[in-house]
Amino acid sequence: MVAATSIAQAQTAEQFVPLLVYRTGQFAPLGIPWADGKQDYLKLVNARDGGVNGVKLTYEECETAYDAAKGVECYERLKGKGTGASGFDPQSTGITFAVTDKAYADKVAIETPGYGLSQSVDGTVFEWNFPLLGTYWTAADVMIQDIAKKEKGNLKGKKIALVYHDSPYGKEPIPLLQKRAAAEGFELSLFPVTPPGVEQKSVWLQIRQQKPDYVLFWSAGVMTPAGIREAQASGFPREKMYAIWWAGSDHDVKDIGAGAKGYNAITIHNSAAKDKVQDDLRKFVYDKGQGTGAAEGVGTLAHTRGMMISMLQVEAIRAAQEKYGKGKALTSEQVRWGYENLDLTADKLKALGFGEIMRPVKTSCSNHMGTDWARIVTWDGSKWENKSDWYQSDKKFIDPLVKEFSEKYAKDKNVKARSCS
């Protein structure tokens, strides 16, 4: 499994973007199209736009295989390239944990769209972390909202199981789910799965015995189709399963086909939509034989999400240039300011070719996630369908958790919270 992080090299008129990837190992089925999308978008910006205000993006790919030690090695090797790495997308919650402390000293932004440390929404404590668009707490909250809607607003007495990858990634939603369970009276059961997650028979046997009303599935890579097949074999209805966004890509379900029909996943973008960015990518990159992966991968869910992640990084560079000088290669610290001052309106997203794909997002000093939007998509046996309107997380559950966990981190790490006034 490869963990990809893109860095555009900052020499004269060059901005370095590090690409951490995982193209090998247990999560490779997800990591490969994700990494391809990230690299393809950087190629598109260079080919179509000549870079960012004339500053070409350079990048180096580093394989992490979803291993924290390898991820740290990539980070250490790439952080000082050019004028400094424009920001790391570690592509792994475990690697994010490992490099977060380093980022304070190195003054390098850590971009974790849809993953990472959920409490790093708090920019007063986590000055260098940017969990853009959503966290695992916001994802879990939206899943519970959608289930509650199906249950006419009453979850009292319901049984909800969490089947999760036994790693920092898989454990992230637990605090939020425990808070929700206490408040709404449902019974929460936890089922860890030992990585890589190919063997799940004992877990699904327990689920068959306990008969939960719903299963939340915190999986990725080879664990995902294995779990769907076990659910099918044990008779658990796929329409009662809700997967995190990393377990809801085309490669997770296409080989299972009708056997996965009804399987739900949460998404931070309009998964069924295509937009001008894919047309531009074919025209300026793939038609010239310069695509990173196979042409048929363009427009798949994971590839689109990879492009989104690079787009956020590029727009942070663009925002920073507005402050520090157009046409200049920027330092890591200057790009961090751009992440903190993103304002991607509907008009801006339309101009970038992402208007049909994602909702507007705006960050600030205190809010490093920005606006969180998520919706539920369902596999119909051959394709994903949007099955819900857009949700936002319930701040009465999220905000106290962010405050509690960020204050604990600040105390444990002796970090002084900054003022955003």
Image (cartoon, rainbow, N blue to C red):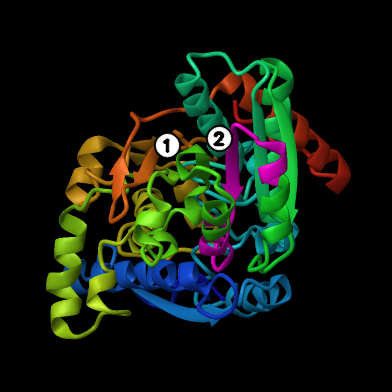
401 or 202, nearer to the observer: 202
Q: Secondary structure at mark 1?
A: loop
For badge 1, the amino acid type reads: Ala
In this view, 319 is above or below 91: above
Q: Residue at position x 29%, y 44% from top?
A: 385
Q: Which mark is residue 374?
A: 1
Counting from the top left corner in percent of width and height, residue 30 is at 47, 67
Residue behind mark 2: 138
In this view, 240 is above or below 44: above
Is tag 2's residue or tag 1's residue first in the polypeptide sequence? 2
Q: Residue at position x 71%, y 53% from top?
A: 203
> Crowding near pointer 1: few (<14 within 10 Å), some, many (20+)?
many
Residues at marks 2 and 1, CA–CA distance in whole angstroms = 9 Å
Q: Is residue 417 visible?
A: no
Q: Is residue 355 visible?
A: yes
Tag 2–tag 1 contact (CB < 8 Å): yes
39 or 223, nearer to the observer: 223
In this view, 50 is above or below 125: below
For badge 2, the amino acid type reads: Thr
Q: Quadrant of residue 314?
A: bottom left
Q: Residue at position x 43%, y 77% from top?
A: 59
Q: Is residue 211 magenta?
A: yes
* 312 relative position to 299: left or right: right
Counting from the top left corner in percent of width and height, residue 195 is at 70, 66
Q: Quadrant of residue 58?
A: bottom left
* Magenta segment boundaries in residue numbering: 207-228
